[in-house]
Amino acid sequence: MSKYTGIKPGIFCVLSLCRSLNRVTMKKSFLHSLKSVWLVVGALLFSPQLLAGLMFEEQALTAWDADAYDAFGSSVAISGDYAVVGAPYDDDFGTNSGSVYVFVYTPTGWVFMQKLNASDASEHDQFGRTVDIDGDTIVIGSRDALITQPTTDPLGISAGAVYVFTRSAASWFQQAKLDTSDPPNDFGASLDLDGDQLIVGAPQDSFYGDKRGAAYIFERNAGNWSIQEVHRPSLYSDNEHFGDSDSEHFGEAVSISGGWAAVGAPDYLQPGADARNGIIYIYQHSGSGTWSEFQDIRGSWRYPYIRHGKKVKVQGNTLVYATGYSSGGTYRVVEYNGSSWEKVEILDAGENRDISISGGKVLVGGHLFVRPVTGWLETPYPGVSPDYILNPDSTSASLEGNTAITGFPGYDGGSLTSSGIAYIHNFLCDVPYSLPHNSWRQIALPCDPGNRNTVEDIFGDDGLGTYGTDWIVFGYDVSTGYFDPGLTGELQQGIGYWIIQLSGNTKNLDMPAGSTPVSAQTGCAGDACFTIPVGTNYRQVTWNMIGHPFPGNLGMSLLRVKTDVAVCSSGCDLDLAEANGLFHNTIWTYSDGDYKAYSLPAGELTPWTGYWSAALENASGTGLSLLAPKI
């Protein structure tokens, strides 16, 4: 299939709002005369939900052998096609021995894959109290697991351990058991995995004082794990002021990502404070195998019991940490500005919820915050409310791309008290498009379908009927004109298409399962962008059918026109491009027999919608392209 990048001039005289559809109208009459067919569609595994304009799909996960008080969903993690759910009070190997359930994504939804247990499982281990997954590696915290200390207790000490599982083909196998020589220390109470690096918290470590805590950084080399460094708090609490123990619980929360590590010590007591207000230590990897303390973030001594750092999560240049008042909790967003970490926002999401970050989204339990395009701006307490509440009762959470998993361990499954439940939420790329009966529409793909990009892959499961009889798609190539790509034709993002369906009812279009946000390209003043194809003709206005490739609204003011010549060589807005005869600053879409114009400054491009745009007379030979910043 050829790359179709534009519409020949004269076919659609949009500037004068001419409504002659010519060949498309001819095809419409042809299709209308053909017989319509119903197609029965199987029941969805996902339950569609609509929150504040965001469509997402939700699937409930439960244990196949659920029992009361298992607390399935106490911990959750997701990576690629695998999701992990901990049930630390499952009793397979004795009371509260604990188990972990692995689910895998299939074309029909998420299905149970395997149940994991420790090779030396025993009662009260709480295996699965914490979990994480990255690629083909799962790490599981068992905070009361026995470790053998022959010189002091040949039967073992309940000090805690972390178990590492790796995948081979369709099964997961235990690769290692990690523990320490400093028990009892609650090792595994927190953990975070980043490739071959793992950080584990031991908040009751007493090496430098009663329960001051520790954090262990492990590294895997050729399948073998070893302790790279052990960190303990560098600042002492003002314990004389309060007259209690040294307990700071450094390591109650830990996170590691991309050369940064964060450790929370929520019971740190600042000098002069009336009660423990907490501290977060931030460490930086030197690149030569060592980690050094880079900065600490402390709660104000004026606010008692704030417990900064009871939860932490770092990804890239963003850190989010929790605080916990007796009456609730908030979450602080901190960003690295190139020299230091600075607080920039307060999020309001309740107390004691896990934090996960992916791209411009922050998930706190079942509360989803979407970062504004312009960046976080600090607001007065109580802070920013969540953009979407996926599940108000979820406390554990994990987010990767546009898929989230949240856990609700207190859920009562029928008569099974606190058996627990977890939810998979797939959003943004599942924004549907409502396609009416017998009406031509311009559409564009809002997400990247990957290798499932044919007409049949994208629309074949939407109940449209028989292709060529009940529905049809048209593209346009500047050199060859309109063409029918057929079921095997490949559709591209950033390009608009015509579609019609004659089923007699409105149909919902959606992207294939596993679609992801588009992989951005470079070229938008250093920011991540996608290049929308634009066709030009010598000294002629050239109409292009375009569509922005993102699953959210894109303001026209964010679009940039880029050329290989002096004008707009570094990117310019639509007004400047129009003033120089390069690209029109208004776009149009066709819907329900009429055109609608969109212009600056308030015009927005919406998901699924195709638009007419015009490259102007001076655009030929300039290497013109249209850049859309990744949102």
Image (spheres, rainbow, N blue to C red):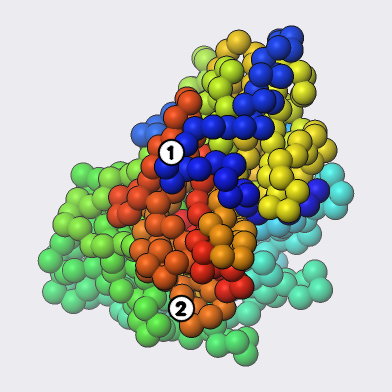
Q: What kind of residue is marked 2?
A: Val
In the displayed structure image, the side of residue 112 where residue 257 appears, left or right:
left
Upstream in the sequence, badge 1 or badge 2? 1
Q: What kind of residue is marked 1?
A: Leu
Residue depicted at 27% across the width and 72% down the height: 298
Residue depicted at 20% across the width and 58% down the height: 379
Q: Secondary structure at mark 1?
A: loop
Asked whether disc 1 touches disc 2, contact meaning CB atoms under 8 Å apart, the reply is: no
Outermost residue toward the right in this view: 169
Q: Is residue 361 visible?
A: yes
- Can you identify the residue that label 2 sits on? 567
Q: Is residue 399 visible?
A: no
- Can you identify the residue that label 1 sits on? 17
Measuring from the top left, give residue 467's x and y in whole percent: 77, 24
Measuring from the top left, give residue 602's x and y in whole percent: 30, 50
Quarter occupied by residue 468: top right
Residue sitting nearer the eye, 458 or 494:
494
Q: How many numbered marks, from 0 up?
A: 2
Measuring from the top left, give residue 526's x and y in whole percent: 49, 76
**Where 225 sits versus 129, above or below?**
below
**Where 123 sits versus 361, above or below?**
above
Density class for disc 1 (Cα within 10 Å; few <14, some 14-19, many ≥20) is few
Residue sitting nearer the eye, 142 or 489:
489
Density class for disc 2 (Cα within 10 Å; few <14, some 14-19, many ≥20) is some
